[in-house]
Image: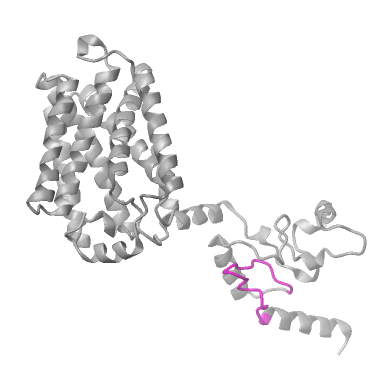
């Protein structure tokens, strides 16, 4: 057999046997191979490259060619990047990852990242800091939404949508609870839900009683479907992607409902913002006492309190920000929003460092089995 025939046979044997580093170390997958790959092997490489796994050390991250193929006496690896012949197929028929790179791969990688199943619970432990942050996000969201809609409602709505999309991407890109991502999404939902609820009244013309009823019915439907699907509404069971979707849908509906309910008591019923806040403070004591002294279902008590915290925070925000003729303290929407966002950021940094709101693994397993826990 001549040299050319032996060379072709050797290349064919090289591609037929997957190299030892094909699966890579620590789960890495490779997208380059010495030898001319068959169609099935190319498909395999394409699928694994589009999965978004990191390259192994053997592959150059700049030009995606085997580092060994760059090796020449006296020439550094980086200097080979200026060789235009290395932008397609390298020596010995190396399949370059650049031939597999495309916009579709990037999109698929992002989609896979945000749709991966969680590795642990995606919500914080219920502590006093949780309720403090919840109240602050409601107040900051109310003031921020009001400020954004002051000058141009279209621009304000666009900003709210962008914040919501970015926050959703960050939260769903995490596979376990990460305080900055969680509370950023909570704040983004507080802003956007307030904007949507206000638009239904101010732009569409639906009375506050109508918007309150609409969001209450929608919230009941979400709860019904969530329980029908998962057999629990416990936040300690948020360990799957589907349950997380139900959870954040519920959060959005509660924020919108709280906004409408707070405006209903403050304006339609004429109580004013400060009086409304104290009314809801009294209301929120009901589930607390019921759970503490009368064995009220913990899941029901939690969601009862969760809904009521929204009009409490929103009413206080409106009181501080609105002018005197609207029963407010006239501090302004902008300054109130800035103070609220800074307070949320400070507490979020604290819980991120102290890690006092991480759900214990043992509690996750126990609570996910019991629908009686919140």
The quadrant the C terminus occupies is: bottom left
Q: Give left or right: position of 44 versus 351.
A: right
Q: Where, by quadrant of the figure, is residue 276 drawn?
A: top left
x then y, percent, for residue 62: 72, 54
x 43%, y 47%: residue: 354
x then y, percent, for residue 177: 39, 53
x 71%, y 60%: residue: 64
x 24%, y 20%: residue: 319
Relative depth, front residue between 153 and 59: 59
Q: Where, by quadrant of the figure, is residue 297 drawn?
A: bottom left
Q: What color scheme is it?
A: one colour
Q: Give left or right: position of 97 versus 122.
A: right
Q: Please tell me whether residue 352 is drawn above or below residue 342 in the rendered image.
A: below
Q: Please tell me whether residue 288 is drawn above or below residue 177 in the rendered image.
A: above
x 67%, y 82%: residue: 17
Relative depth, front residue between 8 and 16: 16
Name the magenta segment's main secondary structure.
loop
x then y, percent, for residue 148: 37, 23
Residue 237 at least partly seen: yes
x then y, percent, for residue 234: 23, 56
* Extreme residue toward the bottom, this view: 1
Q: Which residues are magenta?
A: 16-35
Q: Please tell me whether residue 13 is drawn above or below residue 167 in the rendered image.
A: below
* Extreme residue toward the top, this view: 325
Q: Please tell me whether residue 273 is drawn above or below residue 160 in the rendered image.
A: above
The number of discs equals 0
Relative depth, front residue between 82 and 256: 256
The quadrant the N terminus occupies is: bottom right
Residue 206 at least partly seen: no
Q: Give left or right: position of 95 versus 263.
A: right
Magenta stretch: includes residue 218: no
Q: Where, by quadrant of the figure, is residue 256 drawn?
A: top left
């Amino acid at each position: 057999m001549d040299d050319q025939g032996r060379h072709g046979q050797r290349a064919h044997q090289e591609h037929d046997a997957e190299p030892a580093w094909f699966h890579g170390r620590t789960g890495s997958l490779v997208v380059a191979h010495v030898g001319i790959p068959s169609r099935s092997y190319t498909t395999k490489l394409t699928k694994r490259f589009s999965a978004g796994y990191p390259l192994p050390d053997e592959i150059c991250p700049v030009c995606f060619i085997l580092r060994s193929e760059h090796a020449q006496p006296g020439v550094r690896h980086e200097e080979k990047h200026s060789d235009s012949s290395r932008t397609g197929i390298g020596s010995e028929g190396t399949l370059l990852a650049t031939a597999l790179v495309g916009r579709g791969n990037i999109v698929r990688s992002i989609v896979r990242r945000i749709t991966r199943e969680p590795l642990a619970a995606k919500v914080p432990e219920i502590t006093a800091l949780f309720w403090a942050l919840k109240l602050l996000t409601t107040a900051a969201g109310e003031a921020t939404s009001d400020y954004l809609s002051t000058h141009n409602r279209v621009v304000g709505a666009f900003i709210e949508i962008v914040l919501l999309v970015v926050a959703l991407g960050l939260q769903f890109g995490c596979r376990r609870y990460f305080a900055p991502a969680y509370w950023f999404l909570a704040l983004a939902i507080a802003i956007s839900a307030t904007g949507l609820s206000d638009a239904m009244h101010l732009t569409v013309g639906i009375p506050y009683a109508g918007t309150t009823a609409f969001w209450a019915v929608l919230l009941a439907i979400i709860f019904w479907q969530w329980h029908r699907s998962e057999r629990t509404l416990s936040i300690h069971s948020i360990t799957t992607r589907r349950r997380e979707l139900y959870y954040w849908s519920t959060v959005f509906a509660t924020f919108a409902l709280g906004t409408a309910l707070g405006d209903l008591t403050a304006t339609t019923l004429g109580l004013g913002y400060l009086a409304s806040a104290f009314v809801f403070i009294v209301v929120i004591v009901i589930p607390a006492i019921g759970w503490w002294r009368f064995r009220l279902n913990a899941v029901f008590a939690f969601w009862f309190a969760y809904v009521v915290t929204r009009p409490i925070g929103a009413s206080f925000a409106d009181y501080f920000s609105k002018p005197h003729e609207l029963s407010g303290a006239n501090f302004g929407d902008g300054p109130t929003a800035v103070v609220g966002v800074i307070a949320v950021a400070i507490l979020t940094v604290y819980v991120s460092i102290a890690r006092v709101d991480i759900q214990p693994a043992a509690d996750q397993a126990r609570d996910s089995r019991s629908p009686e826990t919140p």
